[in-house]
Amino acid sequence: MARAAAGPEIERLIQLLARLPGLGPRSARRAALHLVKKKEQLLDPLAAALAETRDTILTCEVCGNIDTQSPCTLCRDATRDPSLICVVEEVGDLWALERAAVVNGRYHVLGGTLSPLDGVGPDDLNIPKLIERARGEEVTEVLLALNATVEGQSTAHYLTDQLADCNVSVSRLAQGVPIGGELDYLDEGTLAAAVKARKAMGG
Amino acid sequence: MARAAAGPEIERLIQLLARLPGLGPRSARRAALHLVKKKEQLLDPLAAALAETRDTILTCEVCGNIDTQSPCTLCRDATRDPSLICVVEEVGDLWALERAAVVNGRYHVLGGTLSPLDGVGPDDLNIPKLIERARGEEVTEVLLALNATVEGQSTAHYLTDQLADCNVSVSRLAQGVPIGGELDYLDEGTLAAAVKARKAMGG
């Protein structure tokens, strides 16, 4: 039985850090030590940043993004095209698309995918609000940027049905070989999709 | 140029999380999202634990361990053998030995190793205090549990010299094949040390 070398306060900090994705018990221990050693440079500002995040964070009532204001910065951005709504599963997906800076429209975060086996139905996701937004006058296209998983794709089909009478065009992301991808390392499903959706050279 | 999808508060949190060992920019982003999503279960308690650590953490004036009291829990523990001082480089090493529960004496944290090239001399480490403790009446053995690196071992030799007139026996950790280690994956230095220090079977 290992003995606790540190006081209960630090043990608690380690346990909480270990629950972050990407940190296990051992790296949480190293992270806690690092924090204690870099008290002024890291522990103090991180404690303050967490407290500030805790006190200021909001979920955008329009799109479901996370921000310190609602409607969020993206929904308020007048330079964005109001005719396009890009639907994503999670806020992390929205951030990924924003890093790539490829969507100049608005977003809509579902908060997951339909999963009857897990008891996740349409009412558990941010779907009614999406339908309502899609009926808005200025919206002409809904891009379903969902994960290329079974759950993501079946959710996309469900949404396509639901959006049928909203007078918008519904699109999805292209599927194929990722940029830089080597065929030898790709799964059969990706290769099949890439062959099926092949394009003319120079097209 | 990637755009910031989240507000400056979250971007700051991500930047600070990315400075923890074991987390890069991408995993820090995931960790921040996870924190925001698990507000009650994780963000709130972690913010509180960090604030408490910030406010209560102390360096033990005797041994250099980190605790919320000084002298620390280990130095106060009357069940520990006061005749043995185990010298380690960093607090993390102390924790590792405590997890293994193999040292039933007191500790002494040097705070690093001698490194003339980096300008780290004897006065920059917690060495004078060690000499003073080693001269204490009840101390009979100093175990130098330093890393098996060039810096650790040259520091061990320096300390052995310094402790020569302290009337204590000075020992070091055994070197050899780690438990569970496969010879094929071990470096030549370890194999050489293991052969040189070989023991009689059943001995």
Image: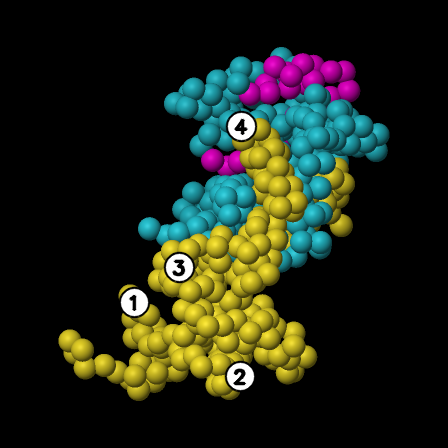
Chain colours: A cyan, B yellow
Q: Tag 3, which chain?
A: B
* Amino acid carrying mark 3 in the image: Arg
Nearest to the observer: residue A176 or residue B127? B127
Q: Nearer the viewer, mark 3 or mark 1?
A: 3
Above or below — where is B140 with respect to B48?
below
Identify residue for label 4: A112
| Same-subunit check for callouts 4 and 1 | no
- Badge number at residue B162: 2
Whether residue A148 is in magenta: the answer is yes
Q: Nearer the viewer, mark 2 or mark 4?
A: 2
User: Mark 2 or mark 3: which comes first in sequence?
Assistant: 3
Q: How far apart are marks 2 and 3 (CA)?
A: 25 Å
* Amino acid carrying mark 2 in the image: Gln
Callout 2–callout 3 Cβ contact below 8 Å: no
Q: Give the range drawn in magenta.
A: A125-149
| Mark 1 crowd level (few <14, some 14–19, many ≥20, 10 Å Cα) | few
Identify residue for label 1: B179
Q: Which of marks 2 and 1 is in front?
A: 2
Above or below — where is B10 with respect to B191?
above
The percent coordinates of residue A106 (x first, y second) are 72, 29
User: Mark 2 or mark 1: which comes first in sequence?
Assistant: 2
Q: How far apart are marks 2 and 1 (CA)?
A: 33 Å
| Mark 4 crowd level (few <14, some 14–19, many ≥20, 10 Å Cα) | some
SS for tag 2?
helix
The percent coordinates of residue B195 (x first, y second) are 29, 84
Identify residue for label 3: B80
| Camera sees residue B75 | yes
